[in-house]
Image: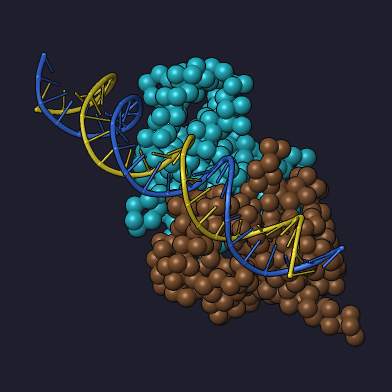
Chain colours: A brown, B cyan, C blue, D yellow
DNA sequence: TGACACAGTTGATCATTGTCAATGCGCCAT
DNA sequence: ATGGCGCATTGACAATGATCAACTGTGTCA
Protein backbone atom coordinates (compact mmCIF):
# COMPACT_ATOMS: atom_id res chain seq x y z
CA UNK A 1 0.00 0.00 0.00
CA UNK A 2 2.77 2.38 0.96
CA UNK A 3 4.53 1.28 -2.21
CA UNK A 4 1.46 2.17 -4.26
CA UNK A 5 1.38 5.61 -2.77
CA UNK A 6 5.03 5.99 -3.65
CA UNK A 7 4.35 5.06 -7.24
CA UNK A 8 1.58 7.64 -7.41
CA UNK A 9 4.00 10.31 -6.21
CA UNK A 10 6.57 9.19 -8.75
CA UNK A 11 4.01 9.26 -11.54
CA UNK A 12 3.02 12.77 -10.56
CA UNK A 13 6.63 13.90 -10.79
CA UNK A 14 7.16 12.17 -14.11
CA UNK A 15 3.95 13.61 -15.49
CA UNK A 16 5.01 17.09 -14.46
CA UNK A 17 8.23 16.92 -16.47
CA UNK A 18 7.10 14.85 -19.45
CA UNK A 19 3.39 15.48 -19.46
CA UNK A 20 3.34 18.85 -21.18
CA UNK A 21 5.48 17.52 -24.02
CA UNK A 22 3.67 14.22 -24.48
CA UNK A 23 0.19 15.67 -24.31
CA UNK A 24 -2.21 13.84 -26.61
CA UNK A 25 0.54 11.46 -27.68
CA UNK A 26 -0.48 7.86 -28.08
CA UNK A 27 0.74 5.73 -25.21
CA UNK A 28 2.01 8.61 -23.11
CA UNK A 29 0.23 7.47 -19.96
CA UNK A 30 1.27 3.86 -20.39
CA UNK A 31 4.83 5.05 -20.99
CA UNK A 32 4.85 7.06 -17.78
CA UNK A 33 3.35 4.15 -15.84
CA UNK A 34 6.02 1.82 -17.06
CA UNK A 35 8.76 4.35 -16.37
CA UNK A 36 7.45 4.77 -12.83
CA UNK A 37 7.86 1.01 -12.27
CA UNK A 38 11.57 1.31 -13.01
CA UNK A 39 12.13 4.52 -11.09
CA UNK A 40 13.99 4.48 -7.80
CA UNK A 41 13.73 7.01 -5.02
CA UNK A 42 16.98 8.08 -3.43
CA UNK A 43 17.51 10.51 -0.57
CA UNK A 44 20.29 13.05 -0.36
CA UNK A 45 21.39 15.31 2.44
CA UNK A 46 21.86 19.00 1.84
CA UNK A 47 25.25 19.57 0.22
CA UNK A 48 25.66 16.03 -1.12
CA UNK A 49 26.29 15.46 -4.80
CA UNK A 50 23.68 13.53 -6.76
CA UNK A 51 26.18 13.11 -9.57
CA UNK A 52 29.43 14.67 -10.62
CA UNK A 53 30.62 16.18 -13.83
CA UNK A 54 32.92 13.37 -14.79
CA UNK A 55 30.47 10.55 -14.03
CA UNK A 56 29.18 8.36 -16.84
CA UNK A 57 25.64 9.57 -17.51
CA UNK A 58 23.77 6.39 -16.67
CA UNK A 59 20.75 7.98 -15.07
CA UNK A 60 18.19 10.72 -15.41
CA UNK A 61 17.23 12.46 -12.16
CA UNK A 62 14.07 14.25 -11.10
CA UNK A 63 13.69 15.89 -7.69
CA UNK A 64 10.52 14.66 -6.03
CA UNK A 65 10.93 16.85 -2.99
CA UNK A 66 13.65 19.40 -2.29
CA UNK A 67 15.90 21.22 -4.73
CA UNK A 68 19.06 20.61 -6.72
CA UNK A 69 21.62 22.89 -8.29
CA UNK A 70 23.56 22.15 -11.48
CA UNK A 71 27.05 23.59 -11.33
CA UNK A 72 30.51 23.47 -12.82
CA UNK A 73 33.62 24.46 -10.88
CA UNK A 74 37.17 25.15 -11.96
CA UNK A 75 40.42 24.25 -10.28
CA UNK A 76 40.91 27.96 -9.58
CA UNK A 77 37.80 28.00 -7.42
CA UNK A 78 35.30 29.84 -9.59
CA UNK A 79 31.93 28.25 -10.14
CA UNK A 80 29.08 28.64 -12.58
CA UNK A 81 25.63 27.52 -11.54
CA UNK A 82 23.75 26.47 -14.66
CA UNK A 83 20.32 25.86 -13.18
CA UNK A 84 18.21 25.31 -10.09
CA UNK A 85 15.96 22.26 -10.16
CA UNK A 86 12.76 21.97 -8.19
CA UNK A 87 10.12 19.27 -7.93
CA UNK A 88 9.40 17.78 -11.32
CA UNK A 89 12.36 19.34 -13.11
CA UNK A 90 14.74 17.08 -14.91
CA UNK A 91 18.51 16.61 -15.14
CA UNK A 92 20.82 14.49 -17.24
CA UNK A 93 18.61 13.84 -20.22
CA UNK A 94 20.98 14.57 -23.05
CA UNK A 95 24.46 13.97 -21.79
CA UNK A 96 26.57 11.67 -23.91
CA UNK A 97 30.10 10.90 -22.73
CA UNK A 98 29.81 12.34 -19.24
CA UNK A 99 27.64 14.84 -17.45
CA UNK A 100 28.80 18.35 -18.29
CA UNK A 101 28.02 19.58 -14.76
CA UNK A 102 27.57 18.31 -11.23
CA UNK A 103 24.26 18.15 -9.40
CA UNK A 104 24.30 19.16 -5.75
CA UNK A 105 21.48 18.94 -3.24
CA UNK A 106 20.45 22.42 -2.11
CA UNK A 107 18.26 20.95 0.61
CA UNK A 108 17.64 17.49 1.95
CA UNK A 109 15.74 15.90 -0.85
CA UNK A 110 14.29 12.80 -2.42
CA UNK A 111 15.29 12.30 -6.02
CA UNK A 112 13.79 9.96 -8.58
CA UNK A 113 16.45 8.08 -10.49
CA UNK A 114 15.75 6.44 -13.82
CA UNK A 115 18.20 4.32 -15.77
CA UNK A 116 18.65 5.77 -19.23
CA UNK A 117 19.18 2.31 -20.61
CA UNK A 118 15.84 1.16 -19.23
CA UNK A 119 14.18 4.32 -20.45
CA UNK A 120 15.52 3.62 -23.90
CA UNK A 121 14.04 0.12 -23.79
CA UNK A 122 10.68 1.56 -22.82
CA UNK A 123 10.92 4.08 -25.63
CA UNK A 124 11.26 1.17 -28.03
CA UNK A 125 7.80 0.06 -26.96
CA UNK A 126 6.23 3.47 -27.40
CA UNK A 127 7.51 4.89 -30.69
CA UNK A 128 5.06 7.82 -30.69
CA UNK A 129 6.42 8.89 -27.34
CA UNK A 130 10.01 8.34 -28.40
CA UNK A 131 9.56 10.74 -31.29
CA UNK A 132 8.56 13.47 -28.88
CA UNK A 133 11.51 12.80 -26.64
CA UNK A 134 13.47 15.46 -28.47
CA UNK A 135 10.96 18.12 -27.53
CA UNK A 136 11.98 17.78 -23.91
CA UNK A 137 15.63 18.32 -24.76
CA UNK A 138 14.68 21.14 -27.10
CA UNK A 139 12.83 22.83 -24.30
CA UNK A 140 15.83 22.61 -22.00
CA UNK A 141 18.04 23.96 -24.73
CA UNK A 142 15.80 26.95 -25.26
CA UNK A 143 15.84 27.66 -21.52
CA UNK A 144 19.63 27.71 -21.56
CA UNK A 145 19.63 30.03 -24.55
CA UNK A 146 17.34 32.37 -22.63
CA UNK A 147 19.85 32.33 -19.82
CA UNK A 148 22.71 33.01 -22.22
CA UNK A 149 20.78 35.94 -23.65
CA UNK A 150 20.26 37.38 -20.19
CA UNK A 151 23.91 36.92 -19.27
CA UNK A 152 25.07 38.68 -22.41
CA UNK A 153 22.62 41.56 -22.54
CA UNK A 154 21.44 42.48 -19.06
CA UNK A 155 23.06 44.36 -16.18
CA UNK A 156 23.56 42.72 -12.79
CA UNK A 157 20.46 44.32 -11.30
CA UNK A 158 18.35 43.34 -14.28
CA UNK A 159 19.56 39.76 -14.08
CA UNK A 160 18.64 39.63 -10.40
CA UNK A 161 15.16 41.03 -11.06
CA UNK A 162 14.73 38.47 -13.80
CA UNK A 163 15.85 35.72 -11.46
CA UNK A 164 13.34 36.75 -8.79
CA UNK A 165 10.52 36.73 -11.32
CA UNK A 166 11.54 33.24 -12.37
CA UNK A 167 11.60 32.07 -8.75
CA UNK A 168 8.23 33.70 -8.07
CA UNK A 169 6.83 31.80 -11.02
CA UNK A 170 8.37 28.47 -10.12
CA UNK A 171 8.18 28.56 -6.32
CA UNK A 172 5.28 30.89 -5.66
CA UNK A 173 2.54 28.46 -6.68
CA UNK A 174 0.32 31.28 -7.79
CA UNK A 175 1.20 33.61 -4.93
CA UNK A 176 3.86 36.30 -4.73
CA UNK A 177 5.57 34.80 -1.71
CA UNK A 178 8.21 32.09 -1.85
CA UNK A 179 11.09 30.53 0.04
CA UNK A 180 14.45 30.55 -1.73
CA UNK A 181 16.34 27.29 -1.17
CA UNK A 182 19.70 28.72 -2.23
CA UNK A 183 22.22 31.10 -0.66
CA UNK A 184 23.19 34.54 -1.94
CA UNK A 185 26.45 33.00 -3.12
CA UNK A 186 24.57 30.41 -5.16
CA UNK A 187 22.47 33.15 -6.75
CA UNK A 188 25.59 35.19 -7.50
CA UNK A 189 27.27 32.21 -9.13
CA UNK A 190 24.16 31.57 -11.18
CA UNK A 191 23.95 35.15 -12.40
CA UNK A 192 27.66 35.68 -12.93
CA UNK A 193 28.20 38.37 -10.30
CA UNK A 194 29.80 38.73 -6.90
CA UNK A 195 28.02 37.85 -3.70
CA UNK A 196 28.07 41.51 -2.70
CA UNK A 197 26.49 42.69 -5.92
CA UNK A 198 23.71 40.15 -5.49
CA UNK A 199 23.15 41.29 -1.91
CA UNK A 200 23.07 44.96 -2.94
CA UNK A 201 20.54 44.05 -5.58
CA UNK A 202 18.24 42.55 -2.95
CA UNK A 203 18.66 45.57 -0.71
CA UNK A 204 17.95 47.96 -3.54
CA UNK A 205 14.78 46.15 -4.59
CA UNK A 206 13.59 46.10 -1.00
CA UNK A 207 14.36 49.79 -0.49
CA UNK A 208 12.46 50.65 -3.68
CA UNK A 209 9.48 48.67 -2.45
CA UNK A 210 9.50 46.08 -5.23
CA UNK A 211 10.05 43.13 -2.90
CA UNK A 212 9.89 42.33 0.78
CA UNK A 213 12.50 40.22 2.53
CA UNK A 214 11.90 38.34 5.74
CA UNK A 215 14.62 36.17 7.21
CA UNK A 216 16.79 36.43 4.03
CA UNK A 217 15.13 33.52 2.28
CA UNK A 218 11.47 34.42 2.44
CA UNK A 219 10.76 36.79 -0.42
CA UNK A 220 7.53 38.48 -1.40
CA UNK A 221 7.16 40.29 -4.68
CA UNK A 222 5.23 43.46 -3.85
CA UNK A 223 5.10 45.11 -7.24
CA UNK A 224 5.19 42.66 -10.11
CA UNK A 225 4.75 45.28 -12.81
CA UNK A 226 7.68 47.35 -11.65
CA UNK A 227 9.86 44.30 -11.18
CA UNK A 228 9.16 43.25 -14.75
CA UNK A 229 9.96 46.67 -16.16
CA UNK A 230 13.06 46.74 -13.95
CA UNK A 231 14.18 43.42 -15.44
CA UNK A 232 13.24 44.82 -18.85
CA UNK B 1 27.38 14.06 -63.41
CA UNK B 2 27.34 17.52 -61.91
CA UNK B 3 24.51 16.31 -59.70
CA UNK B 4 26.63 13.42 -58.50
CA UNK B 5 29.42 15.76 -57.53
CA UNK B 6 26.90 17.83 -55.61
CA UNK B 7 25.73 14.80 -53.72
CA UNK B 8 29.28 13.99 -52.79
CA UNK B 9 29.73 17.47 -51.39
CA UNK B 10 26.49 17.18 -49.46
CA UNK B 11 27.51 13.82 -48.06
CA UNK B 12 30.81 15.26 -46.94
CA UNK B 13 29.01 18.03 -45.07
CA UNK B 14 26.56 15.62 -43.50
CA UNK B 15 29.32 13.28 -42.50
CA UNK B 16 31.20 16.14 -40.87
CA UNK B 17 28.30 16.97 -38.57
CA UNK B 18 26.86 13.51 -37.91
CA UNK B 19 29.85 11.31 -38.57
CA UNK B 20 31.62 11.70 -35.26
CA UNK B 21 28.46 10.82 -33.36
CA UNK B 22 27.39 7.90 -35.52
CA UNK B 23 30.79 6.30 -35.72
CA UNK B 24 30.59 2.52 -35.76
CA UNK B 25 26.81 2.69 -35.66
CA UNK B 26 24.99 0.19 -37.83
CA UNK B 27 23.53 1.83 -40.92
CA UNK B 28 25.19 5.19 -40.39
CA UNK B 29 26.56 5.41 -43.91
CA UNK B 30 23.32 4.30 -45.49
CA UNK B 31 21.48 6.82 -43.34
CA UNK B 32 23.71 9.66 -44.50
CA UNK B 33 23.37 8.55 -48.13
CA UNK B 34 19.63 8.59 -47.88
CA UNK B 35 19.61 11.93 -46.10
CA UNK B 36 21.80 13.38 -48.84
CA UNK B 37 19.19 12.37 -51.41
CA UNK B 38 16.60 14.52 -49.67
CA UNK B 39 18.89 17.44 -48.99
CA UNK B 40 18.51 20.65 -50.96
CA UNK B 41 21.16 23.27 -51.57
CA UNK B 42 20.07 26.87 -51.18
CA UNK B 43 22.13 30.00 -51.71
CA UNK B 44 21.97 33.08 -49.53
CA UNK B 45 23.51 36.50 -49.94
CA UNK B 46 25.47 38.06 -47.13
CA UNK B 47 23.06 39.57 -44.62
CA UNK B 48 20.03 37.51 -45.66
CA UNK B 49 18.17 35.46 -43.09
CA UNK B 50 18.14 31.69 -43.54
CA UNK B 51 15.33 31.47 -41.00
CA UNK B 52 13.82 33.68 -38.36
CA UNK B 53 13.12 33.17 -34.71
CA UNK B 54 9.37 32.94 -35.07
CA UNK B 55 9.40 30.51 -38.03
CA UNK B 56 8.04 27.02 -37.63
CA UNK B 57 11.09 24.76 -37.36
CA UNK B 58 10.52 22.63 -40.45
CA UNK B 59 14.12 22.28 -41.51
CA UNK B 60 17.60 21.57 -40.33
CA UNK B 61 20.34 23.64 -41.96
CA UNK B 62 24.01 22.96 -42.54
CA UNK B 63 26.34 25.48 -44.19
CA UNK B 64 28.18 23.85 -47.06
CA UNK B 65 30.21 26.93 -47.89
CA UNK B 66 30.23 30.25 -46.11
CA UNK B 67 29.20 31.06 -42.55
CA UNK B 68 26.05 31.70 -40.56
CA UNK B 69 25.36 33.46 -37.30
CA UNK B 70 22.62 32.49 -34.83
CA UNK B 71 21.21 35.55 -33.08
CA UNK B 72 18.32 36.91 -31.08
CA UNK B 73 17.38 40.58 -31.07
CA UNK B 74 15.10 42.60 -28.82
CA UNK B 75 12.71 45.39 -29.72
CA UNK B 76 15.05 47.75 -27.85
CA UNK B 77 17.84 47.03 -30.31
CA UNK B 78 20.15 44.82 -28.28
CA UNK B 79 21.28 41.57 -29.78
CA UNK B 80 22.81 38.35 -28.53
CA UNK B 81 24.74 36.18 -30.95
CA UNK B 82 24.47 32.58 -29.79
CA UNK B 83 26.83 30.92 -32.22
CA UNK B 84 28.80 31.14 -35.43
CA UNK B 85 28.29 28.27 -37.87
CA UNK B 86 30.87 27.19 -40.40
CA UNK B 87 30.99 24.41 -42.95
CA UNK B 88 29.50 21.23 -41.55
CA UNK B 89 28.01 22.82 -38.43
CA UNK B 90 24.35 22.32 -37.80
CA UNK B 91 21.38 24.51 -36.86
CA UNK B 92 17.78 23.86 -35.96
CA UNK B 93 18.02 20.29 -34.73
CA UNK B 94 16.06 20.45 -31.53
CA UNK B 95 13.62 23.29 -31.84
CA UNK B 96 10.05 22.42 -31.06
CA UNK B 97 7.43 25.16 -31.43
CA UNK B 98 9.58 27.70 -33.25
CA UNK B 99 13.24 28.42 -33.67
CA UNK B 100 14.53 30.23 -30.60
CA UNK B 101 16.89 32.36 -32.70
CA UNK B 102 17.36 33.65 -36.22
CA UNK B 103 20.06 32.47 -38.61
CA UNK B 104 21.74 35.16 -40.68
CA UNK B 105 24.25 34.70 -43.49
CA UNK B 106 27.60 36.21 -42.49
CA UNK B 107 28.89 35.74 -46.03
CA UNK B 108 27.41 34.66 -49.29
CA UNK B 109 26.85 31.00 -48.70
CA UNK B 110 25.36 27.72 -49.83
CA UNK B 111 23.31 26.01 -47.17
CA UNK B 112 22.06 22.43 -47.10
CA UNK B 113 18.44 22.24 -46.06
CA UNK B 114 16.89 19.04 -44.77
CA UNK B 115 13.24 18.56 -43.92
CA UNK B 116 12.91 17.41 -40.35
CA UNK B 117 9.85 15.40 -41.28
CA UNK B 118 11.79 13.51 -43.94
CA UNK B 119 14.69 13.05 -41.57
CA UNK B 120 12.32 11.54 -39.03
CA UNK B 121 11.05 9.12 -41.68
CA UNK B 122 14.59 8.08 -42.47
CA UNK B 123 15.31 7.63 -38.78
CA UNK B 124 12.45 5.12 -38.67
CA UNK B 125 14.41 2.98 -41.12
CA UNK B 126 17.64 3.15 -39.14
CA UNK B 127 16.76 2.64 -35.48
CA UNK B 128 20.39 2.27 -34.37
CA UNK B 129 21.12 5.66 -35.85
CA UNK B 130 17.98 7.20 -34.38
CA UNK B 131 19.08 6.17 -30.90
CA UNK B 132 22.27 8.15 -31.34
CA UNK B 133 20.43 11.20 -32.58
CA UNK B 134 20.33 12.52 -29.06
CA UNK B 135 24.09 12.60 -28.85
CA UNK B 136 24.16 15.32 -31.47
CA UNK B 137 21.75 17.48 -29.48
CA UNK B 138 23.62 16.65 -26.30
CA UNK B 139 26.84 17.85 -27.89
CA UNK B 140 25.26 21.15 -28.90
CA UNK B 141 23.86 21.56 -25.41
CA UNK B 142 27.25 21.04 -23.86
CA UNK B 143 28.75 23.65 -26.20
CA UNK B 144 26.16 26.17 -25.07
CA UNK B 145 26.87 25.36 -21.44
CA UNK B 146 30.55 26.00 -22.11
CA UNK B 147 29.59 29.38 -23.53
CA UNK B 148 27.39 30.11 -20.52
CA UNK B 149 30.27 29.24 -18.22
CA UNK B 150 32.55 31.62 -20.07
CA UNK B 151 30.00 34.41 -20.01
CA UNK B 152 29.47 34.04 -16.29
CA UNK B 153 33.04 33.59 -15.12
CA UNK B 154 35.46 35.32 -17.48
CA UNK B 155 36.40 38.95 -18.03
CA UNK B 156 35.91 40.63 -21.39
CA UNK B 157 39.57 40.18 -22.39
CA UNK B 158 39.50 36.54 -21.37
CA UNK B 159 36.35 35.92 -23.36
CA UNK B 160 37.95 37.45 -26.42
CA UNK B 161 41.08 35.34 -26.05
CA UNK B 162 38.91 32.28 -25.69
CA UNK B 163 36.96 33.25 -28.79
CA UNK B 164 40.14 33.63 -30.84
CA UNK B 165 41.36 30.20 -29.75
CA UNK B 166 38.03 28.74 -30.82
CA UNK B 167 38.25 30.46 -34.20
CA UNK B 168 41.83 29.32 -34.65
CA UNK B 169 40.71 25.78 -33.99
CA UNK B 170 37.67 25.91 -36.26
CA UNK B 171 38.94 28.11 -39.08
CA UNK B 172 42.68 27.59 -38.98
CA UNK B 173 42.66 24.08 -40.45
CA UNK B 174 45.75 23.16 -38.54
CA UNK B 175 47.52 26.47 -39.01
CA UNK B 176 47.55 29.53 -36.78
CA UNK B 177 46.20 31.87 -39.44
CA UNK B 178 42.54 32.36 -40.26
CA UNK B 179 40.06 34.75 -41.81
CA UNK B 180 37.27 35.94 -39.54
CA UNK B 181 33.95 36.12 -41.41
CA UNK B 182 32.29 38.36 -38.81
CA UNK B 183 32.60 42.01 -37.84
CA UNK B 184 33.84 43.39 -34.52
CA UNK B 185 30.24 44.20 -33.66
CA UNK B 186 29.23 40.57 -34.26
CA UNK B 187 32.03 39.41 -31.99
CA UNK B 188 31.03 41.93 -29.33
CA UNK B 189 27.40 40.77 -29.45
CA UNK B 190 28.55 37.17 -29.18
CA UNK B 191 30.74 37.86 -26.16
CA UNK B 192 28.38 40.26 -24.42
CA UNK B 193 30.55 43.35 -24.58
CA UNK B 194 30.66 46.65 -26.45
CA UNK B 195 32.21 47.02 -29.87
CA UNK B 196 34.90 49.25 -28.38
CA UNK B 197 35.86 46.75 -25.70
CA UNK B 198 36.21 44.05 -28.35
CA UNK B 199 38.38 46.32 -30.47
CA UNK B 200 40.58 47.25 -27.52
CA UNK B 201 40.96 43.55 -26.80
CA UNK B 202 42.31 42.95 -30.30
CA UNK B 203 44.69 45.91 -30.02
CA UNK B 204 45.94 44.74 -26.66
CA UNK B 205 46.61 41.20 -27.87
CA UNK B 206 48.43 42.57 -30.90
CA UNK B 207 50.51 44.99 -28.84
CA UNK B 208 51.48 42.17 -26.48
CA UNK B 209 52.56 40.04 -29.42
CA UNK B 210 50.04 37.25 -28.91
CA UNK B 211 48.34 37.75 -32.27
CA UNK B 212 48.98 39.51 -35.56
CA UNK B 213 46.27 41.42 -37.41
CA UNK B 214 46.34 42.11 -41.11
CA UNK B 215 43.43 43.89 -42.75
CA UNK B 216 41.23 43.55 -39.63
CA UNK B 217 39.93 40.11 -40.54
CA UNK B 218 43.11 38.13 -41.14
CA UNK B 219 44.33 36.98 -37.78
CA UNK B 220 47.42 34.96 -36.91
CA UNK B 221 47.94 33.51 -33.47
CA UNK B 222 51.62 34.08 -32.72
CA UNK B 223 51.83 32.66 -29.22
CA UNK B 224 49.33 29.92 -28.55
CA UNK B 225 50.60 29.14 -25.07
CA UNK B 226 50.29 32.70 -23.86
CA UNK B 227 46.88 33.12 -25.45
CA UNK B 228 45.65 30.03 -23.63
CA UNK B 229 46.98 31.22 -20.28
CA UNK B 230 45.51 34.66 -21.01
CA UNK B 231 42.10 33.06 -21.63
CA UNK B 232 42.66 30.96 -18.50
C1' DT C 1 41.86 62.75 -57.82
C1' DG C 2 38.98 63.99 -54.28
C1' DA C 3 34.81 63.31 -51.49
C1' DC C 4 32.35 60.24 -49.06
C1' DA C 5 30.94 56.13 -46.53
C1' DC C 6 32.04 52.56 -43.54
C1' DA C 7 34.39 49.94 -40.21
C1' DG C 8 37.62 50.02 -36.83
C1' DT C 9 40.63 52.31 -33.42
C1' DT C 10 41.76 55.32 -29.76
C1' DG C 11 40.98 58.71 -26.03
C1' DA C 12 38.44 60.75 -22.16
C1' DT C 13 35.10 60.20 -18.95
C1' DC C 14 31.59 57.97 -16.27
C1' DA C 15 28.81 54.11 -14.49
C1' DT C 16 28.84 49.54 -13.02
C1' DT C 17 30.73 45.99 -10.68
C1' DG C 18 34.46 43.59 -8.01
C1' DT C 19 37.33 43.51 -3.92
C1' DC C 20 38.56 44.08 0.73
C1' DA C 21 37.19 45.08 5.19
C1' DA C 22 34.05 46.05 8.87
C1' DT C 23 29.67 45.29 10.85
C1' DG C 24 25.16 43.13 11.77
C1' DC C 25 22.06 39.37 12.64
C1' DG C 26 20.28 34.90 13.74
C1' DC C 27 21.37 30.35 15.47
C1' DC C 28 23.50 26.96 18.18
C1' DA C 29 26.21 24.99 21.89
C1' DT C 30 27.99 25.62 26.20
C1' DA D 1 22.79 34.69 28.93
C1' DT D 2 27.18 34.52 26.26
C1' DG D 3 30.40 33.58 22.85
C1' DG D 4 31.26 31.95 18.47
C1' DC D 5 30.03 30.68 13.85
C1' DG D 6 27.97 31.22 9.35
C1' DC D 7 25.85 34.10 6.33
C1' DA D 8 24.36 38.52 4.77
C1' DT D 9 24.78 43.48 4.55
C1' DT D 10 27.10 47.75 4.06
C1' DG D 11 30.92 50.98 3.13
C1' DA D 12 35.09 52.56 0.80
C1' DC D 13 37.82 52.12 -2.90
C1' DA D 14 39.74 50.14 -7.25
C1' DA D 15 39.17 48.00 -11.60
C1' DT D 16 36.55 46.90 -15.41
C1' DG D 17 33.88 48.03 -19.10
C1' DA D 18 30.28 51.28 -21.41
C1' DT D 19 29.51 55.52 -23.63
C1' DC D 20 30.43 59.47 -26.32
C1' DA D 21 33.35 61.55 -29.43
C1' DA D 22 37.24 62.22 -32.37
C1' DC D 23 40.15 60.25 -35.55
C1' DT D 24 42.29 56.72 -38.94
C1' DG D 25 42.41 53.85 -42.76
C1' DT D 26 40.43 51.73 -46.73
C1' DG D 27 37.52 51.27 -50.54
C1' DT D 28 34.10 53.18 -53.75
C1' DC D 29 32.25 56.24 -56.82
C1' DA D 30 31.77 60.40 -59.28
Query: Could you tell me residue A98's position as x and y percent?
Result: 76, 46
Query: Could you tell me residue A43's position as x and y percent?
Result: 84, 66
Farthest bottom residue in view: A1
Q: Is residue B106 above or below residue B204?
A: below
Residue ID at (84%, 83%)? A5
**The C terminus of chain A sits in image quarter:** bottom left
Of B23 and B104, the residue lying toward us? B104
Q: Is residue A135 above or below residue A27?
A: above
Relative placement, left or right, of A40 versus B23 is: right
- Residue B11 falls in image quadrant: top right
**The N terminus of chain A sits in image quarter:** bottom right
Residue ID at (65%, 43%)? A78
Of B107 and A48, the residue lying toward us? A48
Q: Is residue B35 above or below residue A172?
A: above
Of B168 and A159, the residue lying toward us? A159
Query: Could you tell me residue A84's position as x and y percent?
Result: 65, 61
Residue ID at (57%, 76%)? A177
Relative placement, left or right, of A173 versus A100 is: left
Of A115 and B105, the residue lying toward us? A115
User: Does residue B231 show up?
Assistant: yes
Residue ID at (45%, 67%)? A207
Query: Could you tell me residue B10's position as x and y percent?
Result: 56, 38
Total numbered circles: 0
User: Does residue B40 show up?
Assistant: no
Amino acid sequence: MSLDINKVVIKTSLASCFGSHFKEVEGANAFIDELAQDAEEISFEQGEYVFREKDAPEYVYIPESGSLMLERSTASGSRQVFAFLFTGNLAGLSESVSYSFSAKALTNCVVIRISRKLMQDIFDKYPSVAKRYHDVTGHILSLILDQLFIMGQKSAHQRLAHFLLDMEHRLGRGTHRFLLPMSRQDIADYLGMSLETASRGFSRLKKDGLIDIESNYHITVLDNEKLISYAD
